[in-house]
């Protein structure tokens, strides 16, 4: 049986999302801002009700341990920008994408982004998959839209695993 590249990438995305849902369903409100280490990145209330992520343009060493809140913002940021690119919209800047303000709203935001992403995936043809990727690489990278979809799957899998591990560590620490 032959499976199209789009269908294979969609299957991989659906599998990754189903694993992520296992963690999303178990998260408690207090999990989102739990600080797992003295050196950490989180989201903080900013002006006008917006929650802003800790950020540094430099590669820090050691790398701060992110909170679940920061990771959920991070997913929302890269996914929102990827959807902008995939839909041919002007991509938003990182500073324009803020965290929704609590865990329940963050989970709803991520689930909404999933729905938007599925709409993007469902309209792609094999010809579309061969087009130059608009993101996250430079235009002359040789990467295709198919690569971009595979990157989304990998990035989501990595971030979902990080959130899951933080959830497990917090639960085990409280036991």
Image (spheres, rainbow, N blue to C red):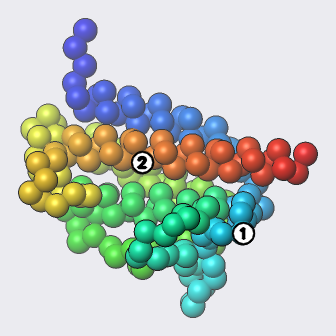
Quarter occupied by residue 2 = top left
Q: Check disc 1 and report its element: helix, strand or loop.
A: loop
Eye-nearest disc, 1 or 2: 1
Image position, residue 106 (x, y; %): 59, 61
Give the CA separation, mark 1 to mark 2: 25 Å
> Which residue: 72% across, 69% down?
38
Q: In which quarter of the image is the N terminus?
A: top left
Q: Residue furthest bottom?
A: 47
> Which residue: 71% across, 48% down?
167
Residue tagged by mark 1?
A: 38
Image position, residue 50 (x, y; %): 56, 81
**Circle 2: is it few (<14), some (14-19), or many (20+) Cα within 10 Å?**
some
Left or right: 54 as drawn, with respect to 150: right
Identify the mark nearer the N-term, 1 or 2: 1
Q: Which residue lies furthest to the right in this view?
A: 175
Image position, residue 10 (x, y; %): 34, 33
User: Measured along the vertical axis of the image, is residue 164 above or below residue 112?
Assistant: above
Left or right: 112 as drawn, with respect to 11: right
Quarter occupied by residue 63 = bottom right
> Which residue: 61% across, 50% down?
163
Residue tagged by mark 2?
A: 155
Left or right: 127 as drawn, with respect to 50: left
Kindly check if marks 1 and 2 are in contact, taking CB atoms under 8 A apart as contact.
Answer: no
**Circle 1: is it few (<14), some (14-19), or many (20+) Cα within 10 Å?**
few
Give residue 23's mark.
none
Q: In which quarter of the image is the C terminus?
A: top right
Numbered-mark total:
2
Q: Check disc 2 and report its element: helix, strand or loop.
A: helix
Q: Can residue 97 be seen in this view?
A: yes
């Amino acid at each position: 049986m032959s499976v199209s590249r789009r269908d294979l990438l969609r299957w991989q995305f659906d599998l990754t999302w189903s694993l992520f849902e296992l963690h999303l369903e178990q998260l408690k409100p207090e999990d989102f801002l739990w600080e797992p280490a003295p050196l950490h990145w989180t989201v903080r209330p900013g002006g006008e009700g917006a929650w802003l992520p800790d950020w540094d343009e430099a590669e820090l060493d050691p790398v701060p341990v992110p909170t679940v809140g920061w990771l959920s913002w991070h997913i929302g940021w890269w996914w929102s920008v990827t959807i902008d690119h995939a839909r041919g919209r002007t991509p938003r800047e990182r500073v324009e994408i803020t965290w929704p303000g609590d865990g329940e709203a963050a989970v709803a935001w991520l689930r909404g982004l999933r729905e938007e992403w599925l709409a993007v995936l469902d309209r792609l043809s094999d010809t579309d998959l061969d087009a130059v990727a608009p993101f996250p690489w430079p235009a002359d990278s040789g990467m295709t839209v198919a690569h971009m979809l595979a990157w989304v799957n990998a990035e989501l899998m990595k971030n979902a695993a990080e959130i899951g591990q933080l959830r497990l560590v917090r639960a085990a620490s409280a036991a």
